[in-house]
Amino acid sequence: MDAVVEWVDARERLPRSGMPVAAATSGRYPPEPGQAVGEDFWLVLPMYFTARHIAEDGTEYRDCFVDSDRVVRLPYGRPCAEPVTHWAELPALPGMAVHQVLGEDARTAVRDAMG
Protein backbone atom coordinates (compact mmCIF):
# COMPACT_ATOMS: atom_id res chain seq x y z
CA MET A 1 0.00 0.00 0.00
CA ASP A 2 1.46 3.37 -1.02
CA ALA A 3 0.87 6.61 0.86
CA VAL A 4 0.73 9.99 -0.82
CA VAL A 5 2.86 12.57 0.97
CA GLU A 6 2.08 16.26 0.69
CA TRP A 7 5.04 18.34 1.86
CA VAL A 8 4.15 21.76 3.27
CA ASP A 9 6.66 24.63 3.32
CA ALA A 10 7.08 25.53 7.02
CA ARG A 11 7.31 29.22 6.06
CA GLU A 12 3.82 29.10 4.55
CA ARG A 13 1.79 27.03 6.99
CA LEU A 14 2.26 25.17 10.26
CA PRO A 15 0.49 22.04 11.53
CA ARG A 16 -2.08 22.17 14.30
CA SER A 17 -0.73 21.89 17.83
CA GLY A 18 -0.12 18.31 18.98
CA MET A 19 0.02 16.93 15.45
CA PRO A 20 2.59 14.17 14.76
CA VAL A 21 4.50 14.95 11.57
CA ALA A 22 7.40 13.96 9.38
CA ALA A 23 9.68 17.00 9.43
CA ALA A 24 12.45 17.79 6.95
CA THR A 25 15.23 19.50 8.90
CA SER A 26 18.50 20.91 7.67
CA GLY A 27 21.75 21.87 9.32
CA ARG A 28 25.37 20.93 9.70
CA TYR A 29 26.50 17.69 11.34
CA PRO A 30 29.44 18.03 13.72
CA PRO A 31 32.83 17.38 12.11
CA GLU A 32 34.69 14.11 12.46
CA PRO A 33 37.98 14.20 14.37
CA GLY A 34 40.60 15.79 12.13
CA GLN A 35 38.07 17.67 9.97
CA ALA A 36 37.83 21.44 10.08
CA VAL A 37 34.08 21.67 9.40
CA GLY A 38 31.03 19.46 9.54
CA GLU A 39 28.85 18.21 6.72
CA ASP A 40 25.55 19.74 5.58
CA PHE A 41 22.45 17.56 5.92
CA TRP A 42 18.78 17.59 5.06
CA LEU A 43 16.80 14.68 6.48
CA VAL A 44 13.37 13.58 7.62
CA LEU A 45 12.63 12.93 11.29
CA PRO A 46 9.42 12.04 13.13
CA MET A 47 8.36 14.94 15.37
CA TYR A 48 5.30 16.58 16.77
CA PHE A 49 4.33 20.21 16.44
CA THR A 50 3.24 22.27 19.42
CA ALA A 51 2.10 25.85 19.93
CA ARG A 52 3.96 25.98 23.28
CA HIS A 53 6.83 23.90 24.65
CA ILE A 54 8.81 24.40 27.84
CA ALA A 55 12.25 22.76 27.67
CA GLU A 56 13.89 21.03 30.63
CA ASP A 57 16.01 24.16 31.22
CA GLY A 58 12.84 26.28 31.48
CA THR A 59 13.14 27.91 28.05
CA GLU A 60 9.73 28.51 26.51
CA TYR A 61 9.27 27.95 22.77
CA ARG A 62 6.30 28.92 20.63
CA ASP A 63 5.22 27.21 17.40
CA CYS A 64 7.96 24.59 17.34
CA PHE A 65 8.69 21.01 16.33
CA VAL A 66 9.92 18.57 19.00
CA ASP A 67 11.54 15.18 18.35
CA SER A 68 11.56 12.06 20.54
CA ASP A 69 14.75 13.23 22.29
CA ARG A 70 12.99 16.51 23.14
CA VAL A 71 15.20 18.46 20.72
CA VAL A 72 13.34 21.61 19.68
CA ARG A 73 13.51 22.78 16.09
CA LEU A 74 11.93 25.95 14.76
CA PRO A 75 10.33 26.63 11.38
CA TYR A 76 12.77 27.76 8.68
CA GLY A 77 13.51 31.48 8.88
CA ARG A 78 13.60 31.63 12.68
CA PRO A 79 16.95 31.42 14.53
CA CYS A 80 17.72 27.70 14.86
CA ALA A 81 20.75 25.49 14.10
CA GLU A 82 18.53 22.79 12.54
CA PRO A 83 15.37 24.47 11.20
CA VAL A 84 12.41 22.57 9.78
CA THR A 85 12.05 23.43 6.10
CA HIS A 86 8.97 21.29 5.34
CA TRP A 87 6.55 19.03 7.17
CA ALA A 88 4.05 16.35 6.19
CA GLU A 89 1.21 14.77 8.08
CA LEU A 90 2.00 11.19 9.03
CA PRO A 91 -0.13 8.53 7.36
CA ALA A 92 -3.01 7.13 9.36
CA LEU A 93 -2.87 3.66 10.91
CA PRO A 94 -3.49 0.81 8.44
CA GLY A 95 -7.15 0.70 7.46
CA MET A 96 -8.02 3.68 9.65
CA ALA A 97 -8.32 7.45 9.44
CA VAL A 98 -6.57 8.17 12.77
CA HIS A 99 -2.97 8.25 14.01
CA GLN A 100 -3.51 6.57 17.37
CA VAL A 101 -5.81 4.13 19.11
CA LEU A 102 -5.58 3.62 22.86
CA GLY A 103 -6.63 1.02 25.41
CA GLU A 104 -8.72 -2.03 24.52
CA ASP A 105 -9.59 -0.43 21.19
CA ALA A 106 -5.90 -0.66 20.24
CA ARG A 107 -5.81 -4.42 20.71
CA THR A 108 -8.97 -4.82 18.64
CA ALA A 109 -7.63 -2.50 15.88
CA VAL A 110 -4.35 -4.44 15.60
CA ARG A 111 -6.20 -7.78 15.51
CA ASP A 112 -8.54 -6.48 12.78
CA ALA A 113 -5.63 -5.07 10.72
CA MET A 114 -3.65 -8.30 10.99
CA GLY A 115 -6.63 -10.44 9.94
Image (tube, rainbow, N blue to C red):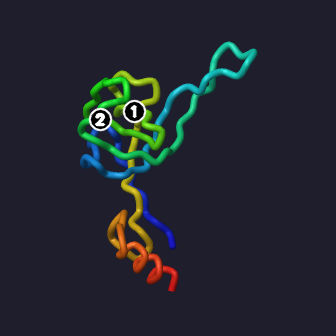
- Who's the residue at 27% across and 27% down the image? 60
Circle 1 residues within 10 Å: few <14, some 14–19, many ≥20: many
Comes first in the chain, label 1 or label 2: 2
Specify the farthest residue to the front: 104
Task: Specify the amino acid type for callout 1.
Answer: Val
- Who's the residue at 44% across and 73% down the image? 94
**Mark 1: secondary structure:** strand
Q: Is residue 26 above or below residue 2?
A: above
Q: Are marks 1 and 2 in contact (CB under 8 Å)?
A: yes
Specify the farthest residue to the top: 36
* Residue 24 position within the rendered picture, expressed as x and y whole percent measured from the top left: 46, 42
Circle 2 residues within 10 Å: few <14, some 14–19, many ≥20: some
Q: Is residue 15 above or below residue 96?
A: above
Left or right: 87 in relation to 27: left
Image quadrant in which you'd find residue 12: top left
**Mark 2: secondary structure:** strand
Check disc 2 and report the residue beneath it. Answer: 53
- Who's the residue at 53% across and 36% down the image? 42
Q: Which mark is residue 72?
A: 1
Q: Which mark is residue 3?
A: none
Left or right: 51 in relation to 82: left
* Residue 102 position within the rendered picture, expressed as x and y whole percent measured from the top left: 35, 67
Q: CA distance from mark 1 to mark 2?
A: 9 Å
Q: Is residue 63 above or below residue 16?
A: above
* Residue 112 position within the rendered picture, expressed as x and y whole percent measured from the top left: 44, 83
- Who's the residue at 47% across and 81% down the image? 111
Specify the farthest residue to the bottom: 115
Task: Specify the amino acid type for callout 2.
Answer: His
Q: Is residue 104 above or below residue 55?
A: below
Of badges 1 and 2, the one in the foreground is 2
